[in-house]
Amino acid sequence: MALATKAPGQAPERTGGGFRWWYPLALTIPAAGVLFYLNRYGDNPGSLTYWVFGVSVVSLIPLANWIGASTEALGQYVSDRAAGLLDASFGNVPELAIGIFLLYHSFAHPSSLESDHAIIK
C-alpha cells in the first residue's frame, strides 16, 4: 500500500493499494520450503536441488519488496538520517541471508569445496 505524506508530526494516510505484479510470486515462499523438505526427505533425496534453488531465488523477490516497503513506512516516522540508515541496513538483508547460507553450506559440506577447487584450477 502506498503511503501519502502528511505534515511533520502526523501519521501518514494509507492510499490505494491494489494488485502488485509480485503478489503471485509470494506463493513461491512456502513452495520453496515444501521443495526443500521433499528434496531432503522425499523418495529421491537430492533430485530436486535445482528446483529448490530456482524457486528460492524467485521467492526473494516478494521478500525484498516487503522489506523495502516496510523500511519506507518506518522512514515516515523517523528523521531523514535514521530513515537512510534503516534503508541502507535492511536493504541488504537478502544478500546477507544468501551469504550466511553459502558460508553454512561450505562448512557443513567441505567435500563439495574440494570439487570446486579442482574445477577452478
Image (tube, rainbow, N blue to C red):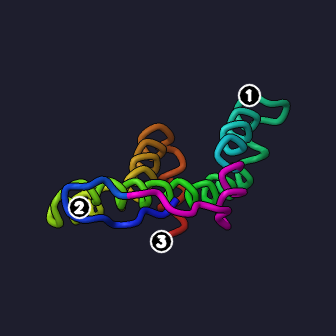
Q: Which residues are magenta?
A: 13-27
Answer yes or no: do the residues labelled 3 and 1 have beta carbons within 8 Å? no
Check disc 1 and give the amino acid type: Tyr
Which dot, 3 or 1, sits closer to the camera? 1
Q: Nearer the viewer, mark 1 or mark 2?
A: 2
**Three-letter amino acid code of the residue under disc 3:** Lys
Is residue 9 a member of the stretch shown in magenta? no
Residue pictured at 25% horizontal, 54% vertical: 77
Image location (x, y in percent) of residue 5: 34, 66
Q: Residues within 10 Å of mark 2 (few under 14, many from 20)?
A: some
Q: Which residue is mark 2?
A: 83
Q: Residues within 10 Å of mark 3 (few under 14, many from 20)?
A: few
Which is nearer the N-term, disc 1 or disc 2?
1
User: In which quadrant of the rendered view does residue 95 lie?
Assistant: bottom left
**What label does residue 41 carry, if any?**
1
Left or right: where does residue 96 sit relative to residue 9? right
Q: Inspect the magenta stretch and tell me whether residue 26 lies in it.
A: yes
- Residue at 64% of width from left, 62% of height from top? 18
Left or right: 1, with 43 as reference point: left
- Badge 3 element: loop
Q: Amino acid at mark 2?
A: Ala
Residue 24, quarter of picture = bottom right
Mark 3 or mark 2: which comes first in sequence? 2
The residue beneath circle 3 is: 121
- Bin the neighbour count of mark 1 within 10 Å (Cα to Cα): few under 14, some 14-19, many 20 and up: few
